[in-house]
Amino acid sequence: MLHVKDLTRIFGQKAAVDRISFSLDRPGFVGIIGRSGAGKSTFLRMMNRMTDASGGEILFQGRNVLALTGADKRGWQSQCAMIFQQFNLVPRMDVASNVLHGILNRRSTLATMFNLWSEADITRALDILDRLGISEQAPKRAEALSGGQQQRVAIARALMQDPKVILADEPIASLDPMNAQIVMDTLRRIHDEDGRLVIANLHTLDTARRYCDRVIGMRDGRIVFDGTPDQLTTGVARDIYGADASFSESATSTSIDALDRDYAQAMLA
Ligand SMILES: Nc1ncnc2c1ncn2[C@@H]1O[C@H](COP(=O)(O)OP(=O)(O)O)[C@@H](O)[C@H]1O
Ligand SMILES: [Mg+2]
């Protein structure tokens, strides 16, 4: 269903993404891991055409994604919803309106200016909030919610688009462990129940192991690992995160996670 072939993005002299190739034959739950600067975000942005590729191909259900223009490109972007580390909600706007903004590009400018949502759209937005367990937050301003709730609103906004693909760029990197778990459980449930393809850039190995069917490890723009969570051994982690990473011979998942947190902190700094 998805074929990525020799996908490349060059910034100046540097290949941020360097001829990556992989295929999925059905919509899975895919995690992409790698240290900061490995090219994970650039890959996701090329997937939904926020960033142009320098070369290569993306075929989704037989469509040549990189060749889409105009309305076709916008159509693809709405089928390919994006979730960000910082939620990207409109802070002062109420939760329900934030969710309704998921279908903004389907509506006329006039309707949007006057906030004229159809009753059917409003009902659907509330149903989605209900499904994600946050319907009572609907009238509140987004900024009044906790980080975990805000990320669920962002997921609700994505679902409003009824996307085939959900791209999540470090969706839990700003959340405490409990909220991180709620958000990951939510994404996994959407995948399991709706059969939507989820591709998530993740900053901890533990999360990738726990939630993903398939894990892709990137380093310096290249894919250095592509396999199942149980194939993610300490040796593989060293390949992904670099030989300078200090693993003890008997490295446990705990020490690997400490390493991940260091990278995550560096990235957030
Ligand atoms: N708009 C840009 N202009 C120049 N360089 C960029 C741009 N976006 C990303 N890069 C570079 O591309 C590389 C990969 O970045 P990114 O995809 O953000 O990595 P990751 O998400 O894995 O941290 C980095 O070296 C980064 O500095
Ligand atoms: Mg990134």
Image (cartoon, rainbow, N blue to C red):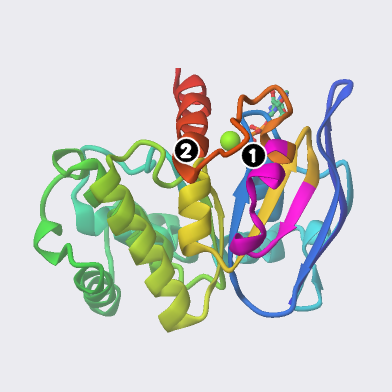
Query: In terms of image quarters, where does ligand 2 lie?
Result: top right
Mark 1: few/some/many CA within 10 Å (<14, 14-19, 20+): many
Q: Is residue 21 left or right of residue 125?
A: right
| Between discs 1 and 2, the one toward the N terminus | 1
Residue 212 colored in magenta in the image: no
Q: Is residue 168 left or right of residue 5?
A: left
Up-down relation of residue 199 to residue 24 (above or below): above
* Quadrant of the image occupied by residue 128: bottom left
Give percent across and percent down for residue 268. 45, 24
Q: Which mark is residue 209?
A: none
Is 241 in front, or is 158? 241
Up-down relation of residue 40 to residue 151 (above or below): above
Q: Is residue 117 left or right of residue 234?
A: left
Residue under the image location 50 percent in, 42 percent down: 252
Up-down relation of residue 16 to residue 188 (above or below): above
Callout 1–callout 2 Cβ contact below 8 Å? no
Residue under the image location 87 percent in, 41 percent down: 54
Q: Which mark is residue 257?
A: 2
> What whole-number distance in Å separates the C-alpha atoms at marks 1 and 2?
13 Å
Does ligand 1 reach within 8 Å of label 1's beta carbon? yes
Up-down relation of residue 49 to residue 25 (above or below): above
Residue under the image location 47 percent in, 50 percent down: 206
Give percent across and percent down for residue 80. 58, 62
Q: Nearer the viewer, mark 1 or mark 2?
A: 2
Q: Which residues are magenta?
A: 224-238
Q: Please indicate, yes or no, whether residue 2 appears anywhere in the rendered image.
A: yes
Give percent across and percent down for residue 101. 36, 56
For disc 1, the marked residue is: 34
Residue 236 colored in magenta in the image: yes
Q: Quadrant of the N terminus?
A: bottom right
> In the structure shown, which secondary structural element does the residue marked by tag 2 occupy?
helix
